Image (cartoon, rainbow, N blue to C red):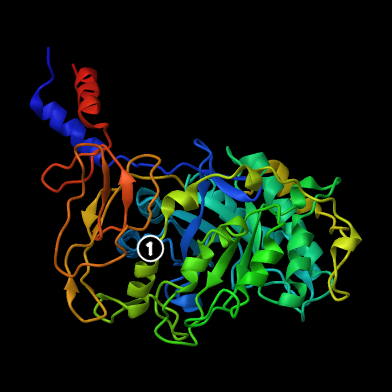
Amino acid sequence: MIASYSRIFTALCALASTAAAVTPLKVDGKDFVNSDTGDRFQIIGIDYQPGGQSGFSTKKDPLSDPDTCLRDAALMQRLGINTIRVYNLEPSLNHDKCVSYFNGAGIYIILDVNSPLDNGSLNRGEPWTSYNPVYFQQVFGIIEAFKSYPNVLGFFAGNEVINEDAEYLVPAYVRAVIRDMKDYIAKHSNRTIPVGYSAADVRNILMDTDRYFECHMKNSTSSQADFFGLNSYSWCGKASYKSSGYNVLTEDFSNSTMPVFFSEYGCNEVKPRVFTEVQAIYGEEMTQAFSGGLVYEWTEEDNEYGLIQVNKNGSVTLLVDYENLQGQFGKLDMDRIQSSNSSQTSVTREECSADLITSKKFLNAWNLPTRLTKINNYIENGLPNKPSGSLVSVSSTSIPVKVYGSDGNEISDIKYKVLADGQVNKPSSTGTSSSSSSSSDSSASGTSTSSSSTGTSTSTNAASMNGASSVLVGGVSGFFMLLASLM
């Protein structure tokens, strides 16, 4: 007997809130690639730490407030973001809903494992005092809390720990942390999750830092970094490829054998920011050396780097910087950016040797600290009382806050849209915003749809019913498959 219409409708409604999942990424040579298709992935991202360090505690972090995450995921979809970086996290909090919102929006996350709280990071002055089991409860706790989410792109083992004032042995301790993290992931995660380092733009030791983490150690293969982030603010205002020094960075990193990307960029010495560096970062020259970048930062804080302003009444104003960045993203040739190149994936790592290091101030030995017994026990047996996380169902919806453009006019068409399985958010081809018009969430024909209200441009067979959540079923054929299963 054919199933009743009520049963079919009930089943479709259930599918409407099914947790869609992006495809995990992996490292292949100097590229991030889709683990299913092998397509190249370039980071089009934002650094995300609402409230700054004052917005973080053991009771709240950027991925523990679902309402805020829903709002921001929708606004990032509109902008065209595919990756966020989150700096400070508390492992014990529940992150399921927030991570699911970003996942459903087609947005990956890169997570720093360190914390500004006591015993939450390496001491660059005396790293041996902080390399201890208490510190690794934080590090391994972050891994446990987030390892099961498919949109976790990777973990940063450290951020700007190495500089000219750091203790000489600091690089060895950071590389030991990378080793310990990768060994823990190999033992306790059902997939390989990349681990890397985020460096300050200290030019006289920058390439030494890259080579130190990149090279291959025969007796400690897991200690090499999987990727390298660079925090650089050398392109200010309407600078150029040469005046900013981007040409030098491109030349320096052209021979790197791991993915390199800007983990922070967006100088604000000239305001508003015009983000002309976007065309260089994703241009043909730089994409041979870099895998994109993350703009600093999402919310307006005291340092005035924000793209959005959260107002006292809870509403949001999109700043001129947001609109300028959206315009720059809209000019990108996404087909070229995502196309694979065998020269990128066929590279091999050099053996670690003292002649890789050029500065006398930088460590030129690879004798890593011995792993402490208790840290080794954590790796072998798992962290006691470990946290866990998993995706939950989320639905396409309007966001429950008012949003205004930089001109003060309300923007009424912003929605959070759950993308189909395997889909990733990307900039719209227009790169413009709308302050009044509304757009459809769906395409019944399965052709490519582009919406200035969402910033997505993705092939989908999803169909919406009266503005409801997108149904993750393959168009007409998917409907009949569902119908058959209910008979």
Q: Can residue 91 be seen in this view?
A: no
On the image, the x and y values in percent for residue 65 come to: 37, 63
Question: Could you tell me which residue is drawn at 12 percent across and 16 percent down?
Answer: 2
Residue at x 57%, y 53% (from the top left corner): 154
Could you tell me residue 364's position as x and y percent? 88, 65
- Give the side of residue 463 with respect to residue 142, left or right: left
> Dot 1 corresponds to which residue?
331
Name the side, left or right, on which 258 lies relative to 100: right
* Foreground residue among 166 and 215: 215
Q: In this view, does 142 lie above or below 448?
A: below
What residue do we see at 47% from left, 81% from top? 238
- Assign the C terminus to one quadrant of the image: top left
Disc 1 secondary structure class: loop
Q: Position of residue 312 (x, y in %)?
A: 28, 82
Q: Label 1 amino acid?
A: Lys
| Residue at screen point 60% across, 76% down | 242
User: Which residue is situated farthest in the top direction here?
Assistant: 1
Look at the picture and state if 212 lies above or below 396: below
The correct choice, above or below, for 131 with respect to 349 in the image is below
Expressed as whole percent of the image width and height from the top left, the position of residue 473 reads: 26, 33
Residue 205 visible in the displayed image: yes
Question: Quadrant location of residue 447?
Answer: top left
Quadrant where the N terminus lies? top left
Residue 193 or residue 449, whichever sits in front: 449
Is 184 left or right of 55, judged from the image as shown? right
Circle 1 crowding by C-alpha within 10 Å: few under 14, some 14–19, many from 20: some
Q: In this view, does 5 lie above or below 159?
A: above
